[in-house]
Amino acid sequence: MAQLPLTAIFDRIPSMFELVKKALIVVIVLFFAKIGWQIVVDDYSYQSWPTAPARLISAEVAVGSKKNGSRYFVVQTTYDFTVNGKVYNSGANKIGVPRFATDQAALQHLDELKSRSTHIVHYHPQTPEKNTLSQ
């Protein structure tokens, strides 16, 4: 078996380094893509999360705007609930919050929400700080 001259070995080192560098970039991109996908899947699978009774503290209609300038309406809620003896609150969660095209539709939803005798919250099993009021 013939041996490569020393200069040929050194000539191949930069190409090997580039290959390793590209492979590392691919691994990093895949890692962050998986994390991003897991966050999306987690947030959209909230209906399968555990539930707990919630106490509605306040609810009101708020106006939001899309990037194109059009408006939408949401019912912003403040509530709390208890999991394993610890009290959690609604925080700034946007998971599962419906948007309405008109203020009348949002007000109707607000009235329905306030008229309920019981409220249920879905909370993330590992991080109950991530939660949403059942609509």
Image (cartoon, helix red, strand yellow):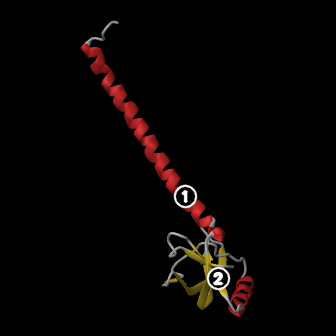
Q: Where's residue 134, x and y in %?
A: 66, 79
* Residue carrying label 2: 120
Could you tell me how far apart the alpha carbons at marks 1 and 2 are, in whole angstroms? 24 Å
Q: Where's residue 127, x and y in %?
A: 50, 71
Residue at the far left in the pictured view: 6
Identity of the residue drawn at 74% across and 83% down: 105
Disc 2 is placed on an element classified as strand
Q: Which of marks 1 and 2 is nearer the N terminus?
A: 1
Determine whether label 1 and label 2 are within 8 Å by CB.
Answer: no
Write down the quadrant of residue 94 in the picture.
Answer: bottom right
Disc 1 is placed on an element classified as helix
* Residue carrying label 1: 38
Q: Taking 54 as reference, is 13 left or right?
A: left
Quarter containing the N terminus: top left
Identity of the residue drawn at 29% across and 18% down: 9
Given the image, on which type of amino acid does mark 1 rest?
Gln
Residue 68 visible to an observer of this rendering: no
Kindly report which numbered mark, 1 or 2, lies closer to the viewer in this rendering: 2
Which circle marks residue 47 in the picture?
Answer: none
